[in-house]
Image (tube, rainbow, N blue to C red):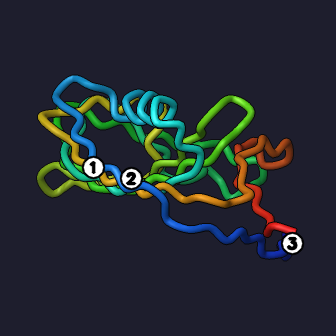
Amino acid sequence: MEKHNIIRLQYSEGSIGRVFVLRMDHGEDLIESLQKFLQEKKIESCMALFMGALRDGQAVTGPKLPVVPPTPNYEAYESAWEVFGMATIYPSEEGPKLHIHSGIGRGREAILGCIRDKAEVYLVVEAVLFEICGLVAQRAWDEKMQLFLLSLRDRL
């Protein structure tokens, strides 16, 4: 039987800064558009809520097996799917690092997972970004988990 390690809760206190409303149009890439906007506006940490439609992408829908490090289970979606979701964005050594989770559906099918790599907008996606100021936060590569994990600490 595998032992589960208890990890100490991490936190960092911040406050809401600027709020942005975005519209991404047909053919744009959701991930690429968000990354460019974050860099242009010099946003280090934020949360985004979004809704609209995507086409032809893939999402990680959990691990293939519950082991560490996990092997991602990918589910592709083709054609046009409705989407709603949220993302958190924190700085990393590579610049702003997004973590996007969403539900996508078409007809009676639904996928819930982490959108990665490509997320082409079908028709339109609307998003609201809430900048978070004053955090001590960073996404850093965790060798054991083989993931970029959020690292937080309170100001001293």
Q: Residue at x 16, y 36 (%)?
A: 80
Callout 1: few (<14), some (14-19), or many (20+) C-alpha neighbours within 10 Å? few
Answer with mark 2 or mark 1, whichever residue precedes in sequence.
1
Residue 61 is left or right of residue 78, and the answer is right
Tell me which numbered mark, 3 or 1, is placed earlier along the sequence: 3
Identify which residue is drawn at 24% across, 52% down.
51
Q: In this view, does 72 lie above or below 152?
A: above
Q: Name the residue under label 1.
A: 21
Mark 2 and mark 1 in contact? Answer it, CB < 8 Å.
yes
Q: Residue 98 carries which label?
A: none
User: What residue would you read off at disc 3?
Assistant: 5
- SS label for mark 1: strand
Whole-Å distance between the Cαs marked 2 and 1? 6 Å
* Quarter assignment of residue 9: bottom right
| Viewer-side label of 3, 1 | 1
Say what secondary structure mark 3 lies in: loop
Residue that label 2 marks: 129
- SS class, disc 2: strand
Disc 3 from disc 1: Cα separation? 40 Å
Q: For the N terminus, which image quadrant?
A: bottom right
Q: Is 145 left or right of 54, judged from the image as shown?
A: right
Foreground mark, 2 or 3, reads 2
Amino acid identity at mark 3:
Asn
The percent coordinates of residue 31 (x first, y second) are 41, 34
Residue type (three-letter) at the residue carrying disc 1: Val
**Labels 2 and 3 touching (C-beta < 8 A):** no
